[in-house]
Each structure stands twice: as C-alpha cells, then as structure tokens.
Image (spheres, grey):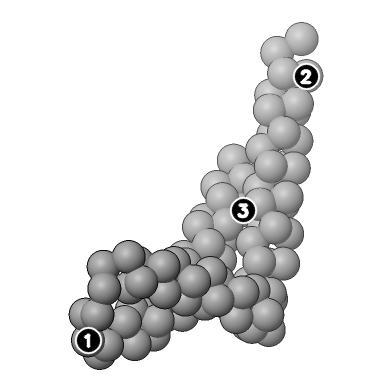
Amino acid sequence: MSMSEAQESWREVGKVLEGLGLKLKMHFEGVQEELEGERFRDAVDAAGAGVQRAFDALGEAIRDPAIQDDVRRAAASLSDAISNTFSEVSAQLRARR
C-alpha cells in the first residue's frame, strides 16, 4: 500500500463529509427561512419553537435517504482511510526492522 492510497482514502472521506454537510445545511436553512418569515410574538415562545423545529429538521434529515446514504459512505470512507493508514504505517515499521 503506497502513501498515495492512504492520502486518496482521506480525500474521499473529506469529499463524502463535505457532501453530507451541504445536505444537512440545506435542511437547516429551510427551517431557518420558515422562522424568519414568522412574526415575533414572544421571545420565549419563539426560542422554544426554533429549538423544536431544529430538532424536527434534524429528525427529517436523518430519515432522508440521501443523508442516510452519505452517512454510510462517510463511515465506509473513514474506515478505508483508517485501514489504509494503519496498513501503510505497519509496512513502514516492518521495513525499518
């Protein structure tokens, strides 16, 4: 396993996590737009509603098949990157003996 394979694995982790982050951001921006359109009634009620909506959006995002797929891909990419890195380090340690 070469250094470039480990580096490519970590690049893939970054790409997958970036995509996941963008999708989560889109979910939360939708909720934010709804909140900005509401009139300010009471600070405590608005804060409570905002927190509830944020958690609702997170719940919806978790059920989104695209988010689920990206989470699976991120986990697989992270696993590959860690495995490739440890394989590379092991090979380098064996070569030093």
List the residue tagged with mark 3: 9
Q: Is residue 75 left or right of residue 56?
A: right
Residue 89 appears in which quarter of the rendering? top right
Task: Tell which of 13 and 95 is nearer to you.
Answer: 13
List the residue tagged with mark 2: 94
Q: Secondary structure at mark 3?
A: helix
Q: Secondary structure at mark 1?
A: loop
**Residue at the location (52% across, 77% down)?**
57
> What is the x, y in percent for residue 45?
36, 71
Distance between mark 3 and mark 1 Cα atoms: 48 Å
Q: Is residue 94 left or right of residue 38?
A: right
Tell which tag, 1 or 2, sits nearer the viewer.
Answer: 1
> What is the x, y in percent for residue 65?
68, 84
List the residue tagged with mark 1: 39
> What is the x, y in percent for residue 77?
67, 58
Residue 12: tell me if it is visible.
yes
Distance between mark 3 and mark 2 Cα atoms: 22 Å
Mark 2, other Cα within 10 Å: few <14 / some 14–19 / many ≥20: few
Earlier-in-chain disc, 3 versus 1:
3
